[in-house]
Image (tube, helix red, strand yellow):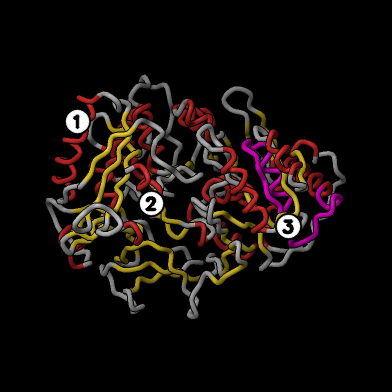
């Protein structure tokens, strides 16, 4: 039996902790023992319906109460799981249907499990003759004795961000999963004394692996909200942390920025964040300004600076590549911007310089190196391509054309990021494909976006810098455009002020002038199903 499944079963047999769902309106708590018993019944139903070991099952569900027992059941039955991308109010349902059918064919899904609030999708599945089950109808099956599962059997086929029209899934084995979860639990000190609070979507690797499977394996108490809970009322996240004494929580940078603004409106003493040991920031670039503001706003409620934990991860490494050290405040590498952009060297500097978060040392199950364009290994503080290998790192992508190697002949996976190493720690500069080259400088879009995001009237976290190239775009030389969402869009006078201030702020902070600035209404910028901005797709708005 795989060590991951063995560990989940062992935790269920001994832990008195469990999972709380239904907050804030109707909380329901099940111990890991109770959840495991339900998972065995669900697994029994799946096997009785014909599921064989090694077969893929897709899941379309939004409620953690449905997802947790179903996920565990699939692994108890020896299958692999894929969380399908979920339609939202902005989704073109015809496009979503075609994309979903393409994914189901790609992973060779033998069944789809549908849960709330997506029951209406069963009509599409029926129309195309796709086998499916309602999550709530599976709990009455016979308890299944877990099926033997090997370490190299796939556990997750994790869809990558934005994989719709050209889907791709990362094949995560039980070996990968156990290695990364074990490293995470050891680094964070996860055990039955801890409490995790999360609202992250479980179709994203950070939501599924970090905020469901880590508590399920380590025995932490888990309080699980939905993304809709957070988006409709962000303060509920802090209220749940306070009420349950959360010790660990994590989210992308934009969510911390939103929460910081909410905390400013809360009276003294209304929240208790003093038990929080880890406030993780990952899944998108960490903005030091955001986290400094969070610490300042949270100090009134007992939030300690040492709780801030900067993370680096990817679906290809199961979840985590590195995390900053526990009990360290956020550490920054201050480097000369000119040397970084023109010469690809991270030279320490003081005064007016660029500050980049130190993201910690790689986990034991992940080996990291930085190479140049010829593949030569670079030394400390030399910027290049970040590559991975190790037990946490996938070996296979699943595509519509079949499986393909994720690693090169030497066993290295190029993650698509540029960065450097310093004293063993990782520093990420940005995505390689998004780098803007102007006058011999390598300018990273995040610098532009953060500068523009500080302009009054711009929605923080809803700005994107798009690379413009001669020939493809109507520009004489490589440049960039800035697209910013604002609630003042449509007000010509306000738009003109915002455009003018974006140009001056970006020139002052990034040293480059945008060729185009567009002010757009909220909700205009395209995003991946997990909420990340899609720079390449944003070009269509120009």
Q: Secondary structure at mark 3?
A: loop
Residue 124 placement: quadrant: top right
The residue drawn where x is 21% and y is 67% is 345
Examine the rendering and report whether any part of residue 186 can be seen.
no
User: Which of the two discs, 3 and 1, sits closer to the camera?
Assistant: 1
The residue drawn where x is 67% and y is 43% is 68
Question: CA–CA distance between discs 2 and 3?
Answer: 35 Å
**Residue 167: x and y, percent?**
55, 56
Question: CA–CA distance between discs 2 and 1?
Answer: 25 Å
Quickly name the residue at label 3. Answer: 79
Q: Secondary structure at mark 2?
A: helix
**Residue 415: x and y, percent?**
43, 64
Residue 131, disc: none
Q: Is residue 70 magenta?
A: yes
- Left or right of 416 on screen, residue 118: right
Foreground pick, 11 / 426: 426
Range of residues picked out in magenta: 46-74
In this rendering, is residue 307 above or below 233?
below
Quickly name the residue at label 1. Answer: 496
Mark 2 or mark 1, earlier in chain: 1
Quickly name the residue at label 2. Answer: 536
For mark 3, does the 10 Å Cα neighbourhood hold few (<14), some (14 to 19), or many (20 or more) residues?
many
The residue drawn where x is 84% and y is 51% is 144
Q: Are marks 2 and 1 in contact (CB under 8 Å)?
A: no
For mark 1, does the 10 Å Cα neighbourhood hold few (<14), some (14 to 19), or many (20 or more) residues?
some
- Left or right of 319 on screen, residue 423: left
User: Which of the two discs, 2 and 3, sits closer to the camera?
Assistant: 2
Q: Is residue 445 magenta?
A: no
């Amino acid at each position: 039996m795989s060590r991951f499944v063995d560990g989940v079963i062992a935790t269920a047999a001994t832990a008195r902790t469990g999972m709380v769902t239904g907050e804030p309106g109707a909380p329901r708590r099940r111990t890991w023992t109770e959840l495991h018993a339900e998972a065995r019944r669900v697994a029994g139903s799946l096997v009785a319906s014909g599921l064989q070991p090694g077969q893929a099952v897709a899941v379309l569900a939004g409620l953690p109460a449905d997802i947790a027992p179903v996920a565990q059941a699939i692994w108890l039955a020896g299958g692999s799981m894929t969380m399908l991308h979920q339609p939202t109010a902005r989704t073109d349902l015809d496009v979503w249907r075609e994309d979903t059918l393409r994914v189901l064919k790609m992973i060779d899904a033998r069944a789809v499990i549908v849960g709330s609030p997506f029951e209406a999708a069963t009509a599409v599945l029926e129309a195309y003759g796709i086998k499916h089950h309602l999550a709530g109808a599976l709990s009455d099956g016979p308890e299944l004795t877990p099926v033997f599962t090997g370490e190299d059997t796939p556990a997750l086929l994790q869809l990558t961000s934005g994989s719709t029209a050209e889907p791709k899934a990362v094949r995560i084995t039980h070996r990968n999963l156990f290695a990364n979860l074990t490293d995470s639990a050891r680094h964070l000190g996860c055990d039955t004394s801890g409490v995790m609070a999360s609202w992250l979507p479980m179709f994203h690797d950070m939501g599924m692996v970090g905020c469901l499977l880590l508590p399920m394996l380590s025995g932490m108490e888990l309080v699980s909200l939905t993304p809709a809970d957070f988006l409709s009322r962000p303060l509920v996240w802090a209220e749940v942390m306070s009420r349950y004494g959360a010790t660990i929580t994590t989210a992308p940078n934009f969510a911390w920025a939103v929460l910081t603004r909410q905390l400013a409106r809360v009276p003294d003493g209304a929240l208790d964040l003093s038990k929080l040991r880890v406030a993780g920031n990952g899944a998108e670039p960490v903005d030091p300004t955001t986290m400094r503001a969070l610490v300042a706003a949270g100090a009134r409620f007992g939030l300690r600076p040492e709780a801030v934990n900067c993370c680096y991860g990817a679906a290809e490494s199961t979840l985590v590549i590195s995390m900053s050290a526990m009990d360290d405040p956020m550490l920054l590498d201050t480097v000369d911007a000119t040397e970084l952009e023109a010469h690809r060297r991270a030279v320490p500097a003081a005064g007016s310089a660029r500050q980049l978060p130190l993201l910690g040392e790689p986990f034991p199950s992940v080996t990291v190196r930085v190479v140049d364009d010829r593949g030569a290994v670079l030394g400390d503080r030399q910027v290049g391509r970040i590559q991975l290998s190790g037990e946490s790192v996938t070996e296979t992508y699943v595509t519509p054309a079949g499986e393909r190697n994720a690693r090169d002949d030497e066993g290295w996976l190029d993650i698509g990021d540029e960065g450097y190493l310093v004293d063993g720690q990782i520093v990420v500069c940005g995505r390689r494909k998004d780098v803007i080259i102007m006058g011999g400088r390598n300018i990273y879009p995040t610098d532009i976006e953060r500068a523009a995001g500080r302009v009054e009237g711009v929605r923080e976290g809803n700005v994107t810098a798009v690379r413009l190239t001669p020939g493809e775009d109507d520009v004489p030389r490589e440049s960039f455009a800035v697209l910013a969402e604002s609630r003042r869009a449509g007000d010509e006078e306000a738009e003109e002020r915002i455009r003018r201030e974006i140009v001056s702020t970006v020139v002052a902070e990034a040293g480059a002038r945008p060729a185009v600035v567009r002010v757009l209404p909220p909700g205009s910028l395209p995003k991946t199903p997990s909420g990340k901005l899609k720079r390449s797709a944003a070009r269509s708005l120009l």
